[in-house]
Image (cartoon, grey):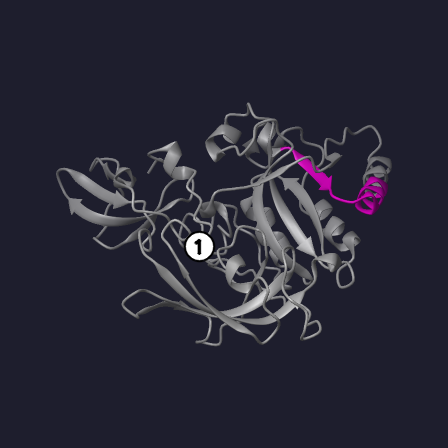
Amino acid sequence: MQLASRALARRALAAAPPRTPRRQACSVVAQSAKAVDGDFVAVHYTGTLDDGSVFDTSRKDGRTPLEFRIGAGNGFDMAVTGLSVGETRKLRLTPEQGYGEREDGAVISVPADRAPKGLSVGDRVQLSNGMPATVTEVDPVKGVTIDLNHELAGKHLTFDVELMALTPAARLSTVVFGAGCFWGPQLLFDRVPGVLSTEVGYSQGSVANPSYEQVCEGTTGHTEVVKVVYDPAELPFETLLDTFWAKHDPTSKDRQGGDSGTQYRAGIYTTTEEQAEVAKKYLEAKKSAMPGVKIWTELEPMREYYAAEDYHQNYLSRGGRNGNPQSNAKGCNDPIRCYG
């Protein structure tokens, strides 16, 4: 299936907790420390609807606490800011703060000759770019009707949150890597022990808040990237560089594997002078080891970064195009299937 509307593709479902919890526990600081913007935190939560039914909880089936960085757009920001480890808070989100209001335009029909065979009402499907939808009607003549609205769109959500741990913002560092289609690199860095969080997005371009479609047109100057947050005291920057250089082709211009275009160019986009100095040494070493070969990998300070649409986040660990989740467990060495 093809994406029906750019406007739908750009909807930010930022308030919901990520579908795939992180597996790297963050450091516990003094009990009296208050969570503030930029801190990396771990929380347990239970989400309920107005009728009292539980739609999600981290407190069952042996699930680990949800981990994220405050200020990164997660809807739990308001719930945890100001809490100390061990404290709790209840927060009710409006639809606007959650998954948005339901949109009539998000319900679309697909002709029978273009719809996959064997679909049933209630099935979850993915569009060609990874955006999820729910099958709401199947007619052998008219075709299939799908709903791109999130199942919680239009609903008020109440969260009971407990702060379990936090790492202060002052201890964290961020670096951004471009290594082709961002789905694979995100899973790659998720698996690195010591990486606290990852997010895919667009960087080094000239247009503010670009959509995926705009970036794919190749006119905005952006490259698809993965943003990596880590604690340098626990994970040396060199380890991230080793991971990056081992898994991308520095000799291809605007191409990685079968994906070509300026949005797929390779690059290291640093946020500190120390990162830039270390990355420069790596780049020079690669050039020395490959005399006569052009190295196209960029090394630049990160100019700007915009998070990609929600349906791109953790794409492969959520199942990818074929609905077959790939492990993001720390230390996992399973081959990464680019489309799932």
Q: Residue 224: horizontal and vertical position, in percent?
A: 58, 37
Residue 294 quadrant: top right
Few, some or many residues within 10 Å of mark 1 (<14, 14–19, 20+): some
Query: In the image, 304: left or right of 125?
Result: right
Q: Name the kind of residue labelled 1 in the image.
A: Gly
Please tell me whether residue 231 is drawn above or below residue 255 in the rendered image: below
Residue placed furthest toward the top: 219
Name the residue that disc number 1 marks: 319
Q: Residue at x 32, y 47 (%)?
A: 101
Residue 155 makes an appearance in the image: yes
Q: Residue 243: horizontal and vertical position, in percent?
A: 71, 51
Q: Secondary structure at mark 1?
A: loop
- Pick the front one: 231 or 157: 157
- Pick the front one: 87 or 247: 87
Query: In the image, 230: left or right of 107?
Result: right
Q: Which residues are magenta?
A: 265-281
Q: Residue 280: horizontal and vertical position, in percent?
A: 83, 40
Please tell me whether residue 295 is drawn above or below residue 313 in the rendered image: above
Q: Residue at x 67, y 43 (%)?
A: 177
